[in-house]
Image: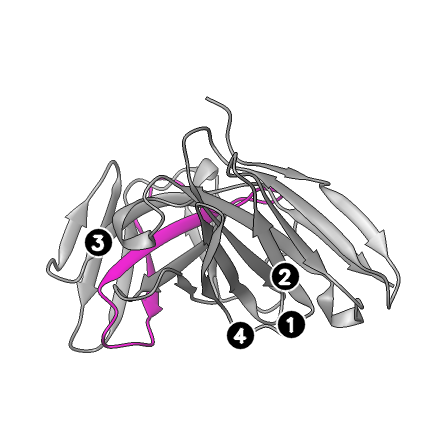
Amino acid sequence: KAGVTQTPRYLIKTRGQQVTLSCSPISGHRSVSWYQQTPGQGLQFLFEYFSETQRNKGNFPGRFSGRQFSNSRSEMNVSTLELGDSALYLCASSLAGHPNTGELFFGEGSRLTVL
Amino acid sequence: GESVGLHLPTLSVQEGDNSIINCAYSNSASDYFIWYKQESGKGPQFIIDIRSNMDKRQGQRVTVLLNKTVKHLSLQIAATQPGDSAVYFCAESLGSQGNLIFGKGTKLSVKP
């Protein structure tokens, strides 16, 4: 069974640009969550989607957005990139759609560098 | 590998010894806790979880202890192996919310 797949693995952008990251969850998983990981702030929750609906959102500015498609694949977008957006963006999927009821399976992340 | 923290607490142990990694969680109302392991260049990997109605749970070579009185969580790894070298994160969750709140992480270094 394939794990969570994130693309691209690495990318470099410049300030002001936008970026779209993609996540394919484990087959059968309907929940996808996104986390940002930085050395200073650690792992921080961005948002969670279940059946194409955003169910939960973290404390990030509106420049960070996401969506989920009918096949459960998810994308996140960051517009008007800032240097501080440089981070590892992790996607996690789960069957039940809630961390209290099921394990989150993480992908290997997309490493974004903003110059 | 992927950077997970420049100033992480580090625990260095000898191969074969037991390791204890500690975590203080933030919300007394949290009712679910998980330990994750993150190796360089990889995403976090589930190790073990525990619900707030328990104070101890055992897995294969790992034990999680929960002390709700002082909001403390610990992960014990028996007979630590070089492959256990990684950054370990605790995470908490509140039943009414659908996200995990992660701790800052502890880097475990196993000396052969």
Q: Could you tell me which residue is drawn at 50 percent across and 30 percent down?
A: A3
Q: Which residue is under mark 3?
A: B50
- The answer to whether residue A113 of the structure is visible from this angle is yes
Alpha carbon distance from label 2 to label 3? 32 Å
Rounded to the nearest angstrom, the CA distance separating label 2 from label 4 is: 12 Å
Kindly report which numbered mark, 1 or 4, lies closer to the viewer in this rendering. 1
Q: Where does label 4 land, which residue? A: A59
Q: Secondary structure at mark 1?
A: loop
Q: The disc labelled 2 sits on which kind of residue?
A: Ser
Can you tell which mark lies on residue A65?
A: 2
Circles 2 and 4: CB distance less than 8 Å?
no
Q: Nearer the viewer, mark 2 or mark 4?
A: 2
Q: Pointer 1: what residue?
A: A62
Label 1, label 2: how many angstroms apart (C-alpha)?
A: 7 Å
Amino acid bearing label 1: Gly
Q: Which residues are magenta?
A: B15-44
Q: Position of residue A79 (x, y in %)?
A: 76, 64
Query: Dot 1 falls on which chain?
Result: A
How dense is the environment of label 4, judged by Cα within 10 Å: few (below 14), some, or many (20 and up)? few
Whether the residues at callouts 2 and 3 have beta carbons within 8 Å, the answer is no
Q: Chain of mark 4?
A: A
In this view, the residue in front, B106 or B17, is B106
